[in-house]
Image (cartoon, helix red, strand yellow):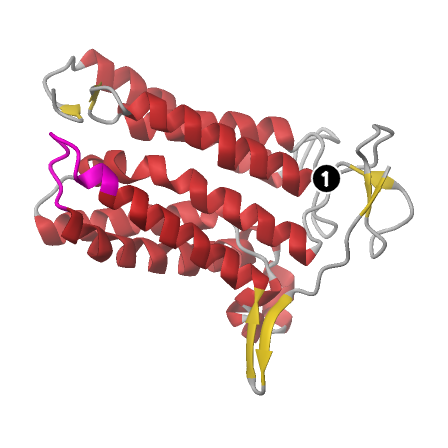
Amino acid sequence: MIQYPQIDPVAISLGPLTIHWYGVTYLVGFVVGYLLARYRASRPGSGWKPDEVGDVLFYVAIGVIVGGRVGSVLFYNTEAFLDNPLMLFKIWQGGMSFHGGLIGVLIAFWLYGRSTGRTFFQVSDFLAPMFPIGLGAGRIGNFINGELWGRVTDLPWGMVYPHVGPEPRHPNQIYQFIGEGIIFFLAIWWFSSKPRPRMAVSGFFLVFYGCYRILVEFVREPDGHLGFIAFEWLTMGQLLSVPMIVAGALMLYFGYKRGKFDTYPEK
């Protein structure tokens, strides 16, 4: 049994200026993603220039923040939002939905592609391998905030969150950091390092994340105000992940069916 380390969610406080660790983790994710994207753009056949990376990541940052926050409210906290609409802007308190952020990012891909003459999948296949870095960084932010804990467990690494109760629980944030951050990054970086049909990298991203999210939800405590959506085991996170898997599988199928006429990176 491990005691949850009480961490001050405020990283820096200088008079009226307060910087939370949650925001710092997102900043780290964007910076590392930016550097990796510049490296990826410099590879032969990428079809991108390193100087373009800053522009596209600006679109992505807006999509992540706006989509993630709005999705969190619409999918998980509708009643609380109706009681206090200003909660939408309190990002530092946590409450960012991956699925909402994904929708925001997809819109950002489309807008950027439209402004530069690229197709949606040219943008998504290029950027998908960088996103696990941001996902992993965000889960560290969840851990520092002491949110999104797991269900009660008797495993030796069960963690006691004093603000939740005396029972040891799965350190779900760490599970997701390892799975969505480290393992996911290594898998998709390897997959995208060889020429793949257009849409395949994007499809791989959706299938991998969707499957892992469904599995990890079995040890993650359901949101208290939602509980189980159905069957006394189905959670909102699992329900929202099913369309991702279906869409990703279709992308992989149709991408490979088209053959290798349009690949990334180019041979």
In screen coordinates, is 251 left or right of 120?
A: right
Quick check: 96 left or right of 27? right
Q: Provide the residue span drawn in magenta.
A: 39-49
Residue 14 appears in the rendering: yes
Q: Is residue 266 left or right of residue 252?
A: left
**Helix, strand or loop at disc 1?**
loop
Which of the pair 120/42 is nearer the observer?
Answer: 42
The correct choice, above or below, for 19 with respect to 187 in the image is below
Give the image location of residue 107, x and y in percent: 29, 50
Depth check, front residue: 82 or 1: 1
Residue at the spot 57% in from the left edge and 34% down from the top edge:
178
> Residue 49 or 219: which is nearer the viewer?
49
Q: Residue furthest bottom?
A: 15
For disc 1, the marked residue is 171
Quadrant assignment for the C terminus: top left
Query: Would you place residue 4 above or below residue 124 in this image?
Result: below
Q: Quadrant of the N terminus?
A: top right
Say if the magenta span includes residue 136.
no
- Seen at 50% across and 37% down, the residue is 181
Q: Position of residue 159 (x, y in %)?
A: 81, 41
Amino acid type assigned to the residue bearing label 1 in the image? Pro
Q: Tell me where residue 197 appears, x and y as whole percent.
A: 20, 20
Q: Does the magenta run of residues contain 48?
A: yes
Residue that protrudes farthest toward the right in the picture: 166
